[in-house]
């Protein structure tokens, strides 16, 4: 029997979160950072891969681990702390990236209007060169890190907002 193990890549888990706030005129704005890592210069949501939360392969389907990864990524990159119980799922998708298969979980969370980035609390703040609040219509899809697009679309279409 032929060895086919090289054909199958382990599944990696990723998270991304639309952090949004409603302006005084009722518009929604969401937070994105300009990447310092490949692809440099693309706008991205706070997010990344699940690592420390998943020490046991059977644990990856536990909701608290996925939410913990989203909270960790938000805090590491932006210095903003959010309550994992307030996260709402917006998308679940899978794709191949650089010889790996990723299952990505997209979340959204509304924050108070006065929420700002706190780089003094961001342990991985170097991953982004700048942070900015965007109105939905301001974004050019060609300037967005492609794994973030399903999460943004799910948010824009108000999908999956259950706890």
Image (spheres, helix red, strand yellow):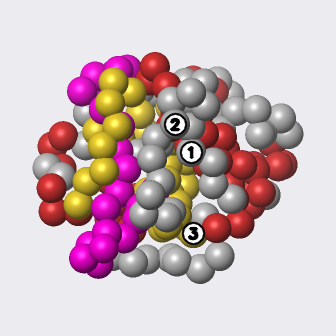
**Mark 3 surroundings: few (<14), some (14-19) or many (≥20) residues within 10 A:** many
Question: Is residue 73 positioned above or below 110 on the image?
Answer: above
What residue is disc 1 on?
80
Q: Is residue 34 magenta?
A: yes
Compared across the picture, whether 69 is left or right of 141 comes to right
Tag of residue 88: 3
**Which of these two is toward me, 34 or 12?**
34
Compared across the picture, whether 67 is left or right of 34 comes to right
Compared across the picture, whether 149 is left or right of 135 comes to right
Q: Position of residue 15 (x, y in %)?
A: 55, 47
Whichever of labels 2 and 3 marks the residue nearer the N terminus, that label is 3
Q: Quadrant of the N terminus?
A: top right
Mark in the foreground, 3 or 1: 1
- The residue at 49%/49% (across/down) is 16
What residue is disc 2 on?
118
Q: Position of residue 147 (x, y in %)?
A: 38, 45
Q: Position of residue 91 (x, y in %)?
A: 47, 64
Give how far apart the Cα atoms at labels 1 and 2 are: 6 Å
Query: Which region shows up in magenta?
Result: 19-41
- The residue at 63%/54% (across/down) is 82
Give how far apart the Cα atoms at labels 2 and 3 are: 23 Å
């Amino acid at each position: 029997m032929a060895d086919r193990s090289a054909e199958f890549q382990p599944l990696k888990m990723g998270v991304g979160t639309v952090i949004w706030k409603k302006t005084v005129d009722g518009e929604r704005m969401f937070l994105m950072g300009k990447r310092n890592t490949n692809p440099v210069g693309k706008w991205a949501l706070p997010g990344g891969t699940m690592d420390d939360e998943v020490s046991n392969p059977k644990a990856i389907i536990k909701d608290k681990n996925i939410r913990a990864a989203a909270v960790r990524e938000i805090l590491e990159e932006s210095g903003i702390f959010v309550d994992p119980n307030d996260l709402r799922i917006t998308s679940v998708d899978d794709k191949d990236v650089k010889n790996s298969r990723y299952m990505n979980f997209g979340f959204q969370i509304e924050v108070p209007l006065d929420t700002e980035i706190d780089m003094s609390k961001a342990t991985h703040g170097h991953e982004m060169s700048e942070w900015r609040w965007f109105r939905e219509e301001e974004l050019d899809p060609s300037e967005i890190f492609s794994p973030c697009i399903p999460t943004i679309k799910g948010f824009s279409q108000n999908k999956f907002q259950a706890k």
